[in-house]
Amino acid sequence: MADIKMTSTWTGGFKGEGKITGEGWDVGIGIPTELGGSGAGADPKSLFTASTLACFTATLRAITEGKKVPVETISVDTDAQAGDDDFAIRHVARVTLAAGSSEADTTAAEAAIERADAICAVGNIARKAGVTIAVEADVRVAA
C-alpha cells in the first residue's frame, strides 16, 4: 500500500486561492466562479477527473512499454459531466505509433488501451463509487 502525503494551504477569503503540494508536484486550487469563488486553480471535481486521467495515461504507457508496442506519442483527451447525482468521464486515447508499424502493432495498441481502462486503480475505485468511465481508442501510425 502506498503512503501518500500532501499538504494544502489557502490564502484569502472565499475568493482566495490555495495550493496542494505533494512529493515533487503542486497544483493550484480554487472555488469555481459559478459558486462565487475566484475560479483560480482547479476545483475538486476537476482534480478528481485529473486523477483518473493520470492513472489511465500512466497505466497505458506502462502496458505499451511492457508489451514493446512502438509508441511515438500518447495523448489523452478527457471530459467529464458532473451533476449532483451522477458523474461520467470520457477518455479518448490517441496513440501514435512509429512509422512503419504493423497492423499487429496497431492491434496491440488498441488492446493496451482496453487493458489500461480495465486495470487503472483510480478508475476502478471511481467505478465502485458509481462513476461511469468510457474510453475510446484512436491509434495511428506516424507518416
Image (cartoon, helix red, strand yellow):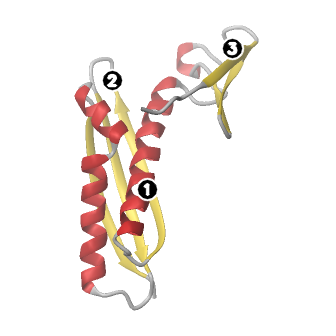
SS class, disc 3: loop
Give the vertical position of 116 relative to 129 (above or below). below
Q: Secondary structure at mark 1?
A: strand
* Callout 3 crowding tier (Cα within 10 Å): few <14, some 14–19, many ≥20: some
Q: Are marks 3 and 2 in contact (CB under 8 Å)?
A: no
Indicate which label's residue lies in the foreground, 2 or 1.
Answer: 1
In the image, residue 140 lies at what x, y percent?
37, 77
Q: Nearer the viewer, residue 85 or 51?
A: 51
Q: Position of residue 30 (x, y in %)?
A: 62, 22
Going by the numbered disc 1, the residue's amino acid type is: Val
Residue 113: quadrant of the picture: bottom left
Q: Residue at x 24, y 82 (%)?
A: 104
Find disc 3 in the rendering and name its residue.
Answer: 15
Badge 3 or badge 1: first in the primary sequence: 3
Q: Nearer the viewer, residue 20 or 33?
A: 20
The local secondary structure at tag 2 comes to loop
Type of amino acid under label 2: Gly
92 shown above or below 66: above
Instruction: For marks 3 and 2, give the CA distance.
Output: 23 Å
Task: Say what amino acid the circle numbered 3 marks.
Answer: Lys
In the rendered view, does 136 fall on the left or right side of 18?
Answer: left
Query: What residue is pinned by disc 2?
Result: 83
Q: Which residue is mark 1?
A: 76
Dots 2, 1 in contact, CB < 8 A: no
N-term-proximal mark, 2 vs 1: 1
Disc 2 crowd rating (10 Å Cα; few below 14, some 14-19, many 20+) is few
Whether residue 16 is situated above or below residue 57 in the rendered picture: above
Measured as percent of width and height from the top left, residue 81 is found at: 35, 33
Q: Residue at x 61, y 25 (%)?
A: 6
How far apart in space, not on screen, are marks 2 and 1 (Cα)? 23 Å
Crowd around label 1: few <14 · some 14–19 · many ≥20 (10 Å): some
- Marks counted in the figure total 3
